[in-house]
Amino acid sequence: MKNIYRRLIQIVKDFLNQGATPHDLALAIALGVIVGMFPVQGTTALICTLIAVLFRLNLIIIQLANYLSFPLMMLMLVPFYTIGHSLFNKGSFEWTFNEMIRLFQTNFWAGVSELSWSIGYAVLVWLIFAPVGILILYIISIKVIRRLKVETQS
């Protein structure tokens, strides 16, 4: 684990040495981590790529942050879905894999509809969470990266 941490720090230092600004790197890290927690599996790499292109951010850093945040995404799936159901008074979200299979076997289109609404609720919760999360991670990242920049200049 310590080797991984050192390697990540070295990657950031290398980008600083190549002229990347602390602001751009911190923003790429913050966006990569938060987008990496987006509650729709299989979409985060594309979203991060689009953000990197639109805002001219470092694609490698944003994707690295995205991929490293996968455990956070898995950890936050249940809270995003549960809070989404609670916010919209749809009862508790307690689906098991077997219940989902049964729902789709019983009435496929009803299953698609129910799952679509649940995903929508989770995305709305993520949209509420994302700006605050990005801001917090940006503030932390910029401080760390500025410290690294001072180290690389010494």
Image (tube, rainbow, N blue to C red):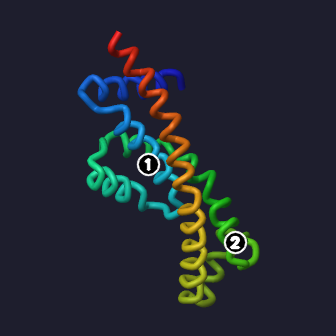
Does residue 72 appear left or right of residue 66 in this picture? right
The count of marks equals 2
Task: Please name the residue shown 56% across and 68% down the image.
Answer: 124
Circle 2: element type: helix
Which quadrant of the view contains residue 16? top left
Determine if residue 69 is in view: yes
- Image quadrant holding the C terminus, namely top left
Tell me the kind of residue under disc 1: Leu
Tell me the kind of residue under disc 2: Leu
Which quadrant of the view contains residue 11? top left
Residue sitting farthest toward the top: 154
Q: Which residue is nearer to you in this view: 62 or 19?
A: 19
- Residue 23 lies, with reference to residue 115, above or below; the image says above
Task: Please name the residue shown 59% across and 88% down the image.
Answer: 110
Does residue 17 appear left or right of residue 142 in this picture? left
Does residue 21 appear left or right of residue 9 in this picture? left
Circle 1: element type: helix
- Residue 81 lies, with reference to residue 54, above or below; the image says below
- Residue 130 lies, with reference to residue 98, above or below; the image says above
As measured in the structure, the alpha-carbon distance from the residue carrying label 2 to the one carrying label 1 is: 25 Å
Disc 2 + disc 1, Cβ < 8 Å: no
Which quadrant of the view contains residue 61? top left
Residue at which label 1 appears:
31
Task: Please name the residue shown 65% across and 80% down the image.
Answer: 102
Across and down, in percent, residue 71 comes to 56, 46
Across and down, in percent, residue 30 comes to 46, 44
Circle 2 residues within 10 Å: few <14, some 14–19, many ≥20? some
Across and down, in percent, residue 85 comes to 68, 73
Residue at which label 2 appears:
87
